Amino acid sequence: MSEYPPYGSEQPGQQPPNQQPGGYPPPPAYGQQPQYGQPSYGAQPAFGQPSYGAAPSGPRPNNNLVLAILSTVLCCLPAGIVSIVYAAKVNGLWDSGQYAQAQAAAESAKKWAIISAGVTLVGVVLYVIFIVILGASGSLSP
Amino acid sequence: MIDLSRRALPRWVAPAATGVAVAAAGALLTVRDPRVPGAYAICPSLALTGTYCPGCGSLRAVNRLLAGDLAGAVGYNVLAVAVVPVLVYAWVAWALPPRLTARWPRVGSAPSRAIYAFAVLVGLYWVARNLPWEPFSWLAPSP
């Protein structure tokens, strides 16, 4: 579900994703092979671990904003607003060098979007099962 | 070290699967009309609180959009109608080969302030569509 191309696919036309405030090491450009020898999401530092100044070990995490919008406005529960707020934090944290926190915020954005969508889907599925079991063909109008 | 988790599938698979899923959902919303009460149960937040959430009416709005009835769609959920083009753009930018879209702005790269503003907008919309007076009552889903 990443918006970024896999590592190793060279994208010579691409620009670095953002401008850095001074003093922090810039994250690698899209598709650019990082030089740290830790090339995957799986190699991110553990959440909560202090990571100021640590070299980013992958591209900027997907902030899951699209999922957040989808789960809030096109369905589901207002819990999606929590997801939007977390999505808003991701890029700023990443750009200021707080890589682990950015990753955690991205995960939270995804989690709340899934909660919002999941609760609704489970509800609809239970409702359909309920209808089938009862053989009720009438409507339960709101 | 080869990272299998990022090499297992060609990159077009996820956008294609998403496209198929959305098309299936659209077909379902056309065949089973969400305007029929109870067709898809009741919005859980409406059932629990008796108030309209930001997503209430969105299935009916999508049903109307697919039927080409823009005015009807706006009547059910104007915010949902407004975000559909954004979501379509996000999907197109994701689905096309990266060499074509490298310079396209990404929805997820929107400035933090804009995203926070959107969150506030959604919150205001949530409140406003439950107010019983015009013009706010126009934001509630059409009966």
Image (tube, rainbow, N blue to C red):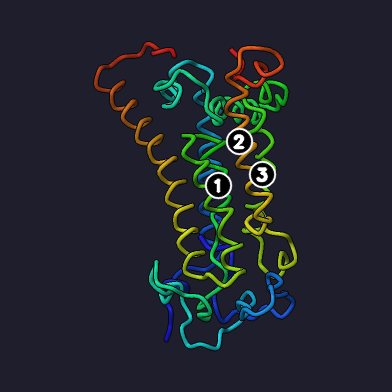
Secondary element at tag 3 = helix
Task: Tell me the CA gap for discs 2 and 3.
Answer: 9 Å
**Residue occupying image coordinates x 62% and y 52%:** B91
Give amino acid for label 2.
Val
Q: What is the chain identity of the residue bearing mark 1? A: A
Which quarter of the rendering shows the N terminus of chain B? bottom left
Disc number for residue A84: 1
Give amino acid for label 1.
Ile
Residue A58: where, in percent of width, then height?
A: 52, 75
Disc number for residue B122: 2
Residue position marked by numbered label 3 in the rendering: B117
Residue B113: where, in percent of width, then height?
A: 67, 51
Residue B67: where, in percent of width, then height?
A: 66, 26
Residue A21 found in image quarter: bottom right
> Does A31 sit above or below residue A65?
below
Which of the two discs, 2 and 3, labels the residue nearer the N terminus? 3
Horizontal side, residue B2 vs residue B131: left or right? left
Residue B82 found in image quarter: top right
Horizontal side, residue A114 vs residue B53: left or right? left
Task: Tell me the CA gap for discs 2 and 1.
Answer: 10 Å
Please tell me how many numbered marks the rendered image carries: 3
Q: What is the chain identity of the residue bearing mark 3? A: B
**Disc 2 and disc 1 in contact, CB within 8 angstroms:** yes
Secondary element at tag 2 = helix
**Residue occupying image coordinates x 69% and y 77%:** A22
Give amino acid for label 3.
Ala
Disc number for residue B18: none
